[in-house]
Amino acid sequence: MAVVALVAGSAQATASDDVLRRISDPAGQVLQTLDYANTRYSRLDRVNAGNVGQLQVAWTFSTGVLRGHEGSPLVVDGIMYVHTPFPNIIYALDLDHDGRILWKYEPQQERDVAAIMCCDLVYRGLAYAQGMVFLGQADTTLVALDAKTGAVRWSVKNGDPKKGESNTATVMPVKDKLIVGIAGAEFGARGHMSAYNMKDGTLAWRAYSTGPDAEMRIDPEKTTELGKPVGKDSSLHSWEGEQWTIGGGAPWGWFAYDPGLNLVYYGSANPGTWNPSQRPGDNKWSNAIFARDADTGVARWVYQMTPHDQWDYDGVNEMILTDQRVDGQPRHLLTHFDRNGFAYTLDRQTGDLLVAKKFDPHVNWATGIDMDKASPTYGRPRLDPKYGTEAEGEDVTYPGICPAAIGAKNQQPAAYSPVSGLFYVPTSSMCMDYEPFHVDYASGQPYVGATLNMYPAPGGDGRTGNFVAWDNVKGRIVWSIPERFSVWSGALATAGGVVFYGTLEGYLKAVDATSGRELYRFKTPSGIVGNVMTYEHHGRQYIAVLSGVGGWAGIGLAAGLTDPNAGSGAKDAYAALSSYTALGGQLTVFVLPGRP
């Protein structure tokens, strides 16, 4: 098995050329997911299964900000770029001098934007290309900074916080454009994916998740789902009246890119509102995977994983691109671990569905996915009516649904090793009681329409997390490591045969890529919801991670919530977390002892 080979096809030097050139040298990191394929696999191997137990702290850096520290630093030409949660401060640190501050960028944002960020004030990190560092601020401002000086090259507003639109996602440079999403489905914001011209920040194209074909950039005859044309106004026919205008579907997660196919891949979020009785129909194209042409934004194919979402199972988790054999034949694959508890393997060129299996054994809202191509419900979940949330109407509590809305996996990215052929997946093992209620839409106000009570899945002795090794072709768990709390940190796989991840208690852990045997752990000052990264400097390999508890799982502790219903059910579900960690904001950098 091999990681997909991504080769730029343009004769003219573009951002993609620069990104691909820098990706070819594993010493640095220019994208949050390490490469366009989102593998989060590093070819560095000085730290390996035989010596990782000797890691020690090299240096640390305080960000000066509390709340959830998601994402990871970047490293380019001896400089580390570190971001913080809101207010989205950026630091450039000199690696020759243990993180001496070269410059600092602190945007001035209205504090009001914090009130519309549903699940903590997080930000998932920066991107780099052609001498610029790119930042997506919480208030949706997109900023290009000079990498050497921190000076603003250009900035542009991508949304309107007064309408409930915000930003938590990273951005992705592709060719001469910058790809950016939006958040705000919980406020009825109509989701869109946008591409900005990198030279000056002007808008190149925008594609909405719901609505008319032209606004969605869908060709009714050429855009397909599972090999068949979606047909005219496929989204409009799946909503009642004008509900699509406040239909959510915000793409606030991760993006992937295949230069050979020139396709950008991403997922859309839940439909608005969480109360399914208020929005009859499939609610296309929320909870869906999109493959779009990078130049035009036109959708090549789309696949909806959770039609008429009744549980808040956003589809925004990362798409991981690999080249592997299926039934003895080489295929260009896309693997996606969804909030709904199913792992999907598709042909990323055609959108064909190849595998759809539960990666969380507790999943009960659906018994499986219909894989019979001759069936009229091919590709759709086989629902268990016992765990729906609208059969008896509103203001009724529907108990025992697994997974909880927080998902069997949320945005924290998985990793893939071409050596082991396995995916390493940070997961949650939570169930919920769900009570929908009627909610009226008002611009800029919460448009949720449900209250949740989340709790550990049965049979886990109160534990709510697992770190899972997954075979995406066979659709099975190879091994699983139970964790006390949901694993909210992104994984990192390395050529040294080691996989790293962090825990909500604050441990950085290293495990054997083949067996899952723990090789190392270190307790950082605060819970880890960031993504582990690695780089090389002056011949030495370093491991780095941001700690700072927060995110949806840690929102109760991070925001000091007292209302039992606050945090969309997370406050009480993770109440025990306060006995294991406290607020913080720190970068911890590790290295092996001695000289290279």
Image (cartoon, helix red, strand yellow):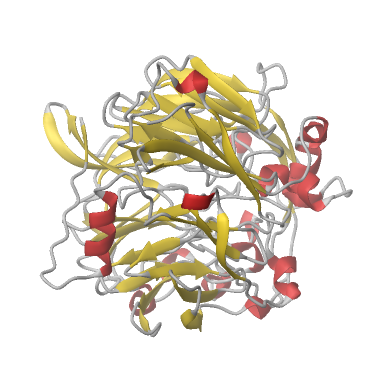
Q: Residue at x 28, y 28 (%)?
A: 473
Residue 439: percent from left, percent from top: 74, 65
Q: Residue at x 26, y 74 (%)?
A: 296
Looking at this view, is 138 or 410 the one in front? 138
Quarter of the image for residue 419 reads top left
587 sits left or right of 283 in the view: right
323 sits left or right of 451 in the view: left
Relative vertical location of residue 227 with respect to residue 332 in this rendering, above or below = below
Quarter of the image for residue 215 reads bottom left
The answer to whether one can see residue 537 in this image is yes
Residue 126: percent from left, percent from top: 48, 61
200 sits left or right of 253 in the view: left
Residue 267: percent from left, percent from top: 42, 55
Q: Residue at x 28, y 55 (%)?
A: 22
Which image quarter is the N terminus in? top left
Residue 378: percent from left, percent from top: 32, 42
How many labels were placed on the picture?
A: 0
